[in-house]
Image (cartoon, grey):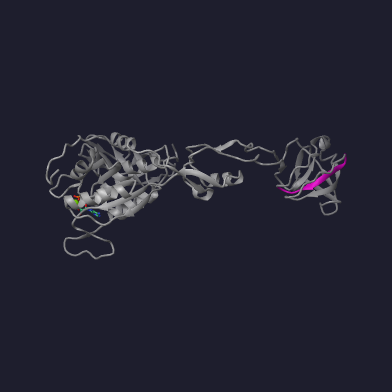
Amino acid sequence: MLEGDTVSVPEMISLEDARALVLSKVDALETEDVSVLEMIGRVAAEDLASDIDISPFAHAAMDGFAMRAEQLVAASPDTPVKLDVVAEVPAGSWYEGSIDEGQCVRIMTGAPLPAAADAVVKYEIVEVLSGDGRKGSRVAFSAPVEAGAQVRQAGEEAKADEVIVHAGEVVHSAGVGFLAGCGVTQCKTYRRPTVGIIATGSELVDPTETPVKGQIRNSNSYALAASAVDAGAVPTVLPIAADDFEGLRAAVVAATADYDFVVTSGGAANGDYDFIKQVVDDAGELLMTTVNMRPGKAQTFGIVNGTPVFGLPGNPAAAYLGFEMIIRPALRKMQGYSHFERPHVRARLMGDVKKKDPRRIFNRATLSKDEDGNYLVTPAKNQSSGLFGPIQKANCFVILPEGPHEYHTGDILDCVMLDIPEEVLL
Ligand code: AMP
Ligand code: MG
């Protein structure tokens, strides 16, 4: 196709359809084996089972004295039961001797419960009549105890061969410990997608440079690379492409050979120097050009050489929102995640907003709480799509649904929280 030719443009679609379209074009990548510590925040690609019972043996949950509950049936403050301490069982040891009538053993937290005992009474509520409370002492109990008290039973948390983390589950820090305790030190997870990021615009210079007349720094590539890292992907910031059809085409096609997902920013609208739609249409299959949202109506998506290529708009807030709402879900699906929506909360609007644009608007805003714990949302003063600053200061987007409307202080609006993983607050 020649520069300047018109492309067959699919009509504007909803954000939901855009997300569904992009999700339909990606799958979980192949799996890789990683150490359990590297599983933090990642998705298990197979069921993970314990190799032993957890805990492996019944043990004391507190420092105290072990005996059979039946020995203390008659214990009361007026008629304490007095026992001789015949052994000490520290953690890591094992007591196989007997506990006869009139006897108990001193036991430490984590030490195996002797087979001759069925309960533990914590040290703090036992009176030491003679000695130092250790072996050779005599101690008094002023209350009965239930069998099983202060005992963590064998296999209480998991049985040998029982699945403890299921395929598809996201592993959190406690899960890393759980797996380690169950002997799972290597896990299968999905490979992180690589993302090639190309900023297009003849006005752009690298952030290390000081822009001269007409130039601006390429901030998008950095925000998008950071967003990619945040989504679990591995980004590469590729050289800036000028506003030139052939140059951009060559850069995009080369990137599709090297990366799992290619993201461009800029040149996505209908200006004389906007070429990403033509590039995708010419080099591959153009599937989407426009999404019913603001900022960021111009969102191009297609497949080139079997690789998803997403052309974000150039305006920073528009590029950020497109990545956040449409690309991030795809990068997460490639890593096996199954939740794609950040947590939403409903909040009381602080201020008046006149909405003229019929598109669904995502305004940069800050969520806080009133004294009763109700959410309040304050939109940022400057909603220019050209700015990253208000997003850095914001913690949500407040959503103004499709259609013109006037909103007032006190109206309840839906807000999508930023920087909180999708699995939280489903
Ligand atoms: P475009 O989508 O190419 O028309 O660009 C829209 C606006 O975003 C223009 O003001 C561009 O200068 C600006 N812009 C485009 N690309 C970038 C970028 N990589 N970093 C920062 N601003 C950009
Ligand atoms: Mg441009």
Give, as a single range, the part of the protein colored magenta.
101-109
In-front residue for pair 236/418 = 236
Residue 401 coordinates in the image, percent (x, y): 28, 36
Which residue is rendered at x = 52% and y = 50% of the image?
A: 37
In-front residue for pair 329/397 = 329
In-front residue for pair 268/162 = 162
Residue 231 coordinates in the image, percent (x, y): 39, 47
Q: Is residue 109 above or below residue 239?
A: above
Which residue is rendered at x = 36% and y = 41% of the image?
A: 329
Please identify the quarter of the rendering in which residue 339 is found. Answer: top left
Quadrant of the snapshot with the C terminus: top left
Residue 114 coordinates in the image, percent (x, y): 78, 42
Would you say 146 lies left or right of 206 here? right
Please identify the quarter of the rendering in which residue 20 is found. Answer: top left
Is residue 392 visible in this depiction of the protein? no
Would you say 245 lies left or right of 49 here? left
Q: Is residue 312 magenta?
A: no
Is residue 141 visible in this depiction of the protein? yes
Residue 112 coordinates in the image, percent (x, y): 74, 44
Quadrant of the snapshot with the N terminus: top left
Which residue is rendered at x = 75% and y = 35% of the image?
A: 147
In-front residue for pair 229/349 = 229
Q: Is residue 103 magenta?
A: yes
Number of on-image labels: 0
Would you say 178 lies left or right of 330 here? right
